[in-house]
Image (spheres, rainbow, N blue to C red):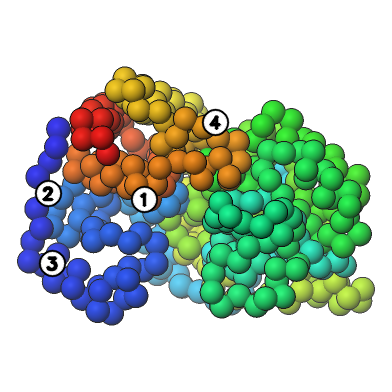
Amino acid sequence: MTITRKETDSQADLIEKAHRVLPGGSVGNVYSDTIIRRGAGSHIWDVSGNEYIDYLLGSGPMLIGHAHPDIVAAVSGQIGQGSTFFATHELAILLAEEVTKAIPCAEQVRFTSTGTEATLYAMRTARAARGRDRILKFEGGFHGMNDYALMSTFAPENAPPLPAAVPDSAGLPGCIENEMLIAPFNDIDAATALIEQHHDTLGGVIVEPCQRVIPPAPGFLAALREVTARFDVPLIFDEIVTGFRVAYGGAQEYYGVTPDLCAIGKAMAGGLPLAAVAGRKELMDCFNPTSKEDGRYMPHYGTLNGNPISAASGLAALAVLRREGTYERLFDTGRQLMTALQQAFDGVGTPVQVIGAPPVFDIYFTDQTIRCHRDTLTADTAKVQTFNRRLLDHGIFRGDTKFYISIMHSQEDVDRTVAAFNAVAEEMAATSE
């Protein structure tokens, strides 16, 4: 059922202020004029009081829902004990211990505040340990906003032949292009050939085990693990999205492949700013001042590293995720929605591809099978914008891409969302949008 969204004078005033004081009227993530006031469970409300079922979930951190009572209690309890110390504290130790129990590759942990920092330091760790500069990444892989990550993430159709890198942003030093090799995701022959040819100059290989929402082809990750191990090149899994989401042990558990290093974040801290690099002790020792002796030492200062409020939230969030049946319910919700979304457009004859894992998936308006970044370029971006806008009119909120599922999405949420999928598919077919 289409809702009539109201816009109060207060919201109109905030929108005007946003465009005056924020570039593009945004904090930099979602460029729309929906101004959020609060969230609870699987729902959010804008400043005009409109209510939405939320599938953006803060771009993934709210896996256990907004304002979860256990998170509220943990954060409230810690605030009175101190907000930050710039020193080792109990909660950071306990959270690091829990991460090492959960994540297969994690023998030690170094906390950061953002995923961008975590992927930056994961790549730096590989280079420091290996003593070589170049990093191989996969075209279309998103590894945050650091300079090295911003290569060939949004590569256009006319991108130069691989393995040449394409800068994604203005302001990047030109020399970085030469330090990044780009491979096609899910093409193990091409990746293997690049690693065999350039292993003497490679510091590491970084990959999203599920790239955005593109699943790895059968055997791809295992083969990547084999070739990197053969040449002693550190393999990094960017698990900022998949960590604690597709399984408690992340993609490493879900796909059964263990890298040397990983970056984790988002779901780990229940919505508070916290991320981490984790991996084998031999590599993580590069953070240890004792590594000055062999020239591998990486100083890592951060005012909010392992922030106690975030760590308290993290411990509470992981305790919730360990409860019996959590992942079974999460996957069941996601499967229902993925199936219904595909069926809605199949039913009106609109070719779409719904791909991903049940806890995080997306829709592409194309009849092309999606196996790599260049396949996604066949999708009709105008249609997805129309789809998103019409979903909003039906009380369904998501970002430009992806549906993130939380453990708080109820069967009623699912039923309402399925009805919205069907209505939007019919509306778009009727107007040929």
Residue that badge 3 annotates? 12
Amino acid bearing label 3: Ala
| Left or right of 11, for residue 397 | right
What residue lies at 42% left-to-right and 31% top-to-bottom?
352
Tell me how far mark 4 sits from mark 2, CA to CA: 36 Å
Amino acid bearing label 4: Thr
Instruction: Return the mark for residue 369.
Output: 4
What residue lies at 10% left-to-right and 58% top-to-bottom?
7
SS assignment at label 3: helix
Amino acid bearing label 1: Gly
| Left or right of 5, for residue 334 | right
Image location of residue 178, percent across then percent down: 75, 68
* Residue situated in front as seen by the camera: 140 or 25: 140
What residue lies at 23% left-to-right and 42% top-to-bottom?
390
- Tell me the crowding category of disc 2: few under 14, some 14 to 19, or many 20 or more residues within 10 angstroms, Cα based: some
The residue furthest front is: 158
Residue 365 sits in which quadrant?
top left
Residue 119 sits in which quadrant?
bottom right
